[in-house]
Image (tube, rainbow, N blue to C red):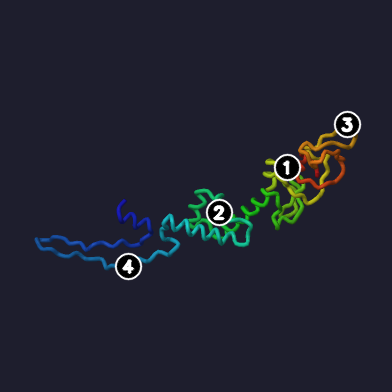
Amino acid sequence: MSFAEVLNRMGASYIPHAPRHTMAGGTEKQAEIQAYTPPTPLPPEQLPRHPAESSVSLNEALKLACEGLTVEPSQIRERMSGSDVSDWQKGKITDDELRGFARLVADRCLIEAGRRPSHYTHPAVCAGCGPVWLWKPMRVEGCPWCDNRRHGRLIPRPEQVQCRSCKHFTRTGSPGVGHCMVGQPKTPTNLWESAPRWCNFFVPHRGSES
């Protein structure tokens, strides 16, 4: 690639030329020389970044994005793809968007630990998980807690549930009682199918209300 092409890619609006001379009638005559105009400096955000400088800048941006959150910059960086990093370096991802992404990761880390994010303040019903905490009241086909359900992790409940609506409940010979197939509670005991109880391992039958 020529130097001129490099300058063009960097956005230089003017490429200086060396004075040119022509030969006419055996006498060297200086051609008209274009007056030199210094190129307009590029704004800082348009200057090409060295990879090491970009990495440091991203680390600083992640530290700011994580302020006040229960998550570390390294946890945010782990969940960013190569294209995410490239988009941030090109200015396609703003600091506000990076902050929003950090909040989502912080929520995800709490949920994976079986804890409720502080802004999940409204009871909701997920078709897969049953009653859960979300950010506003609704009934949904899937929710952020579904991954906990699929991996057998805790799901804190906003309300009590009934064993008869849970897929883990198996009825015994006695009417109205049964056992939990995942051992909740851990002490062996018969469970009344209609008795309300708190359970972090409840998984509803599809179509059940609780």
Who is closer to the viewer here, 174 or 84?
174
What residue would you read off at disc 1? 128
Q: Nearer the viewer, mark 4 or mark 3?
A: 3
Q: Is there CB contact under 8 Å for labels 2 and 1? A: no
Badge 1: residue crowd in 10 Å (few <14, some 14–19, many ≥20): many
Mark 4 to mark 1: distance in Å?
Answer: 65 Å
Query: What amino acid type should be assigned to the residue bearing mark 2?
Result: Ser
Q: Mark 2 points at which residue?
A: 74
Which residue does the image show at 28% across and 62% down from the upper left? 16
Q: Where is residue 176 shown, x and y percent of the image?
A: 89, 37
**Closer to the camera: disc 2 or disc 4?**
2
Q: Which mark is residue 173?
A: 3
Q: Is mark 4 on a helix, strand or loop?
A: loop
Q: How far apart are marks 3 and 2 (CA)?
A: 54 Å
Q: Residue at x 86, y 33 (%)?
A: 172
Task: Identify the residue under disc 4.
Answer: 38
